[in-house]
Amino acid sequence: MAPAPAHVRRDSFQNKRPRPRRLRQPQPIADRLSGRGRLAPHFPFAKAGILDEIHENPGQPVVVQAAGRKRRNFNPELPPAMPSPSRCLPSILAALCVVASAATAADSIGYFDAIASDPAPIVGQQYYTRHCFMFEKGAAETTNYWRGSLVPINTQVMLVALDGKKVVVRLPSGETVTIENIEKFSRRSTSMIAHNLLATQPVPIGSFNDATASAIKSGILKMGMTKEQVIMARGYPPGHKTPSLDFDTWTYWSSRFVTQSLVFSNGVLVRGRDVLP
């Protein structure tokens, strides 16, 4: 008998009714342990002698006693409980605070203690700058705008004049810079401005690592700096927005209309505008 034409075979194939798919039902854990499932030989408790107890008490914890091992509770239906992340978070934060506080104490060079112990500046004497500052066209303001030419920390200067409104210093180049104290913004007297700026001895920034010391000299702020190091690099924030250095947020002005906020955590700089990582 000759075979049927190709189109006839194709039509008959297409007319066949599809066989319904049989959905696989989830297999109980007891069946998998007893050998009726494919995973039984690989299950670690298949040979532990607990099959009968699981069949008799399904879903209940089973005490497993393996050879040479300690007793332990095993629940075949529930995974082992994990510690809640919310319970661990306070301990982690407390540990980080301790580490940050230790790092702050280790990086301190007694900057503020040195200011308190130094005598008041005297006109005509040579001093070293305690922090960086910027000036423009021979003038600077205690609002601490960050534009113009940089005078790095530990620059040797001469105090030329000091009165109730301004501090005048002469740079090594011979150029004179007049620092005007706008007290309603600085919230400090001119004599305090001079005392915080001028030191009888250089600030020992060599005790910091090279990267931090270089950043301070360049007036650059970096994450992880302490409050002392921030003041060395950037000077003091205006007091009308930052009344106390104990605050965790300091506000500077890059220019008259641009502010720069710095945020500290446990005395360490953690974020801020134009702050390098």
Image (cartoon, grey):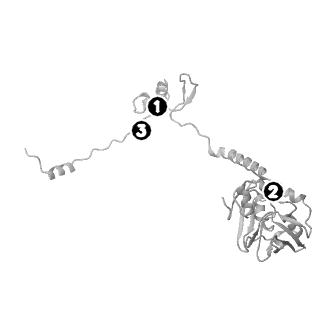
Q: Nearer the viewer, mark 2 or mark 1?
A: 2
Measured from the top left, where is residue 178 in percent x and y? 83, 74
Q: Which mark is residue 126?
A: none
Q: Which mark is residue 204?
A: 2
- Type of amino acid under label 3: Pro
Q: Quadrant of the C terminus?
A: bottom right
Dot 2 surroundings within 10 Å: few (below 14), some, or many (20 or more)?
few
Q: Are marks 2 and 3 in contact (CB under 8 Å)?
A: no
- Please give left or right for residue 5 compared with residue 155 in the image: left
- Type of amino acid under label 1: Phe
Q: Which residue is mark 1?
A: 43
Dot 1 surroundings within 10 Å: few (below 14), some, or many (20 or more)?
few
Q: CA distance from mark 2 to mark 1?
A: 66 Å
- Residue positioned most to the bottom: 137
Q: Which residue is mark 3?
A: 26
**Residue plotted at (58% across, 38% down):** 81
Q: Are marks 1 and 3 in contact (CB under 8 Å)?
A: no
Label 2 sits on a secondary structure element that is: loop
Is residue 103 among the parts visible in the rendering? yes
- Type of amino acid under label 2: Pro
- Residue positioned most to the top: 67
Quadrant housing residue 176: bottom right
Q: Quadrant of the N terminus?
A: top left
**Residue plotted at (18% across, 49% down):** 12
